[in-house]
Image (cartoon, grey):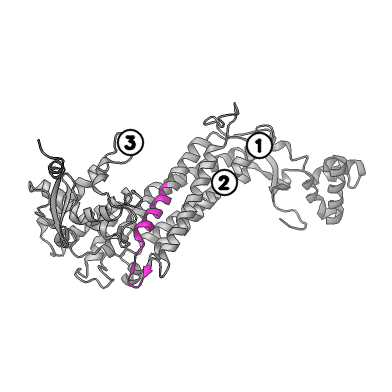
Amino acid sequence: MPSRTNAAAARTRRESDSMGDMLVPHDALYGATTQRAVLNFPVSFRPVPLEQIAAHLLLKRCCAEANADLKQIDRAKAKAIAGACDEILRRLAQPNAHGRFPDFMRHFPIDVFQTGSGTSTNMNVNEAIANVASERAGKPIGSKLPVHPNDHVNYGQSSNDTFPTSMQVAGAVLIQDDLVPALEALAKGLRAKAKAWDRVVKIGRTHLMDATPIRVGQEFGGYAAQVELGVKRAKTALAALAENLPIGGTAVGTGINAHPKFAAKVCARLSKATGVAFREAANHFEAQATRDCVVEAHGQLKTIAVSLSKIANDIRWLGSGPRCGLGELSLPATQPGSSIMPGKVNPVICESVIMVACKVAGNDVTITAGGFGGVGSLLELNTAMPVVAECLLESIELLANVSRTFLEKCIKDLELNAAAAATVERSLMMCTSLAPVIGYDAAAKVAKEAFKTGETIREHCRRTGIVSDAQLDRLLDATAMTKPGGKGPGGG
């Protein structure tokens, strides 16, 4: 019977890299360099996001084909690399039994908190591609035949230009394919509510206090406009990521070991594959020494998060109650709200949106710190890239997912209650339309006296005769008060 030591050895194979031999799990598609990183960084046990691994594989495919076009590597080797990339991407697209994380991601195990350049992940991808190419060619895993992870898969490249490039590619594609459609759908849903409720006049509120009338359609039209601006901001973020790819700069931005036309060809292939207009960085030294483009892009994402938090918070306020709150809206009942209070229903979807906004704001702090000089950006290279990439991609995914959830589980089935219109006549701020006629001070006196007596502004004015009944009816027309054209002092 074999010893436990021999049994363990049977589950490993011996690989080597520039530092020497390393035992690797026998069925792992990665090699010695990846295994060193797995052992070196047992930190969060969160791997580099799937979206970036997929983008890195696509980048490697485009690099191999560009190198073949430029006669830098043999066409057969480029084909072997491209075929391996396609095979891995296909297997990464297969979810596990729970429908989420593909089992094949076990071949990309390196922690987010690794070497700041992403070198470990770049080599992980290089080794996996080389080993799949070996499998496809009928060669042993680890043989580095027909392609070598460094000499062929990584030809004309460095971790220092590939990792930031795949970060930007992943972010841009995720914004294009996921976030923009989700925001567009949410904006459309809010716009539909604005149209349906445009004739309903309610009381506006500033500083959480009664203000002048506003139509519900105007209020929801403001929410729709926030999200429509969010679509524009998302596209601005996409452009910041797409227009400045570092690929071609290799180690420090000089392009050593890369063909002068290599980057342009890679960008053209990436654009064709994704539908995003990628362009080579105008200045490779800037593109590799900083992550300013990601700081810029994520600033737009943070603004979107802030907008969503405003909409969600307003809706939960307007839906508060059902009897002792504002009660202007009825939110869909999605789940029991309390383990102790029977029948309680909470605005849980709105709370989810707000928590996502908090997380995106936190990610923005991390990305900003990762871009700081002396923290992440040091001379010719940014060395906080893996965590910057994780935060960027997480924010995009969270915003897209929560936008869809907000629309489907809250906005679509929102109902407007009679309470929305019931408070208009009771508001003391109806006196605002009197000010151009009787003056600000007199109108303020009317409001104070009406509050003391418990009267409405209309009742008080009729009792005191401060203006004629006909004039009063005109001045206190709530619908007219929601339209521009009146005169008088402004304020908040």
Is residue 61 at all visible to an observer of this figure? no
Q: Which mark is residue 99?
A: 3
Tell me if residue 420 comes above or below residue 439 in the rendering: above
Q: Nearer the viewer, residue 230 or 467?
A: 230
Q: Quadrant of residue 324?
A: top right
Q: Position of residue 431 (x, y in %)?
A: 80, 48
Residue at the left extreme, as displayed: 138
Total residue callouts = 3
Which amino acid, mark 3?
A: Gly
Tell me if residue 147 comes above or below residue 338 in the rendering: below
Q: CA distance from mark 1 to mark 2?
A: 15 Å
Q: Residue at x 35, y 73 (%)?
A: 379
Q: Is residue 389 magenta?
A: yes
Predominant SS of the magenta segment: helix
- Does label 3 or label 1 sit earlier along the sequence? 3
Q: Is residue 300 magenta?
A: no
Q: CA distance from mark 2 to mark 3?
A: 31 Å
Q: Is residue 436 rendered to the left or right of residue 73?
A: right
Q: Is residue 391 rendered to the left or right of residue 407?
A: left
Which region is colored magenta?
A: 377-397
- Does label 2 or label 3 sit earlier along the sequence? 3
Tags 2 and 3 touching, CB below 8 Å: no
Which amino acid, mark 2?
A: Ile
Secondary structure of the residue carrying numbered label 3: loop
Q: Nearer the viewer, residue 284 or 390?
A: 390
Quadrant in which the C terminus is drawn: bottom right
Residue hosting label 2: 311
Q: Residues within 10 Å of mark 1 (few under 14, many from 20)?
A: many
Q: Residues within 10 Å of mark 3 (few under 14, many from 20)?
A: few
Secondary structure of the residue carrying numbered label 2: helix
